[in-house]
Amino acid sequence: MLIDMHQPEDVFARVPELAAQIDPVLQALDGLLEDDQLYQQVRADLGKRYRFTLVHGRHSTPVEVILRMLLCKHLYQWSFKETEERVKDSLVLRWFCRVYFARVPDETTLLRWLRTLRPETLHALNDRVVELAKQAKVTQGRKLRLDATCVQTAIHHPTDSGLLVDSVRVLSRLVKQAKGLVTDQVSYLEQTCRSRLRSAKQAAQHLHRQLRRKGEAKEAEQKHLYQKLVEIAEHMVRQATRVVAALNQQPAAEAQRLLSEAERILPLVTQVIAQTRSRVLEGKKVASANKILSLFEPHTRAIPRHKGGALVEFGRHVILDEVEGGS
């Protein structure tokens, strides 16, 4: 059943004063978020998550907690996991998000609730914020300046061979860490938890030497070495998949941590293998938006600069905006 709020705790009575000293932005936002029109727009969407969300079932995460935690995530550019951890560890953020001493919703809960918000609601929220800012005489809401830049991510120069070696390295490390946890669940344990990193490195070294050679025969040899690298990566995917199936039966915290890491990395490795097959072995083009350029920063994109220096940067576009008054 959808509920509106937790019961306030007296221990938080002086926290607003502390919040004003630490971050005055939170103090200002706290007043804006008391706006009932803004709150009702969000509540209407969340109430449509399931057919009887408003009237039946166990109590949900309160609407104001969801709204305020999502705002903190956006304000500080945190991930969903980081938002959960920061709110959990901070008395001020527990007060601001109206969690108090209740359980902080986890990252998956926040993500599921966020998906229930319609684009129309988010546009309406932005319009309401502008209206409130005009009422507070922060801005007249008539001018908006926009600029964009590229923020580079800390990755090595992406190549198909490098990504395949990274894939083998990460999966090899994962299956080795899981070896002691899945002894009873996996047959042929040594083969399943075997690292293939040395084979991948040797194939990559041969490939790099071939790239420096000249002549018509080198292209066929390069494809052969790429095929070998792809097959090694596919072997590691099959090994990791067997380990994941075994970890699913383990309730231990370490097993669940490894399971979460495997479920995050396996789809990325599978995509790296697919894009290498398409680009190198089949000679097809892969759209930039569909490319994986880093397993560790998967949001990275190749961005043409059309300026002096590097022709392409690897990172993300960041859009900066400012209204009159510098807000």
Image (spheres, rainbow, N blue to C red):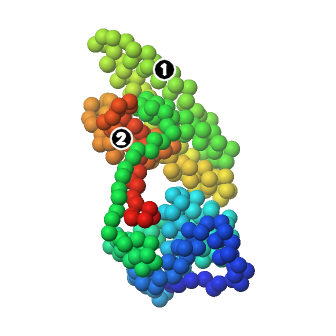
Q: In which quarter of the view is residue 195 placed?
A: top right
Looking at numbered disc 1 in the image, what kind of residue is underneath it? Gln
Percent position of residue 158, x then y? 43, 33
Percent position of residue 165, x then y? 49, 31
* Mark 2 or 1, nearer chain start: 1
- Residue at 65% x, 42% y is 177
Instruction: Tell me if residue 36 can be seen.
Output: yes
Tag 2's secondary structure? strand
Tag 1's secondary structure? helix
- Return the residue at label 1: 205
Residue 129 or 94: which is nearer the viewer? 129
Looking at numbered disc 2 in the image, what kind of residue is underneath it? Ile
Percent position of residue 63, x then y? 51, 79
Check disc 1: other Cα within 10 Å, few if <14, some if 14-19, many if 20+: some
Instruction: Tell me if residue 269 can be seen.
Output: no
- Return the residue at label 2: 303
Residue 62 or 241: which is nearer the viewer? 62
Instruction: Give the mark toward the camera: 2 or 1.
Output: 2
In the picture, which quadrant includes the C terminus?
Answer: bottom left
Which residue is the extreme one toward the right? Answer: 11
**Eyeballing the image, is 95 above or below 268?**
below
**Eyeballing the image, is 133 above or below 260?**
below
Percent position of residue 248, x then y? 58, 55
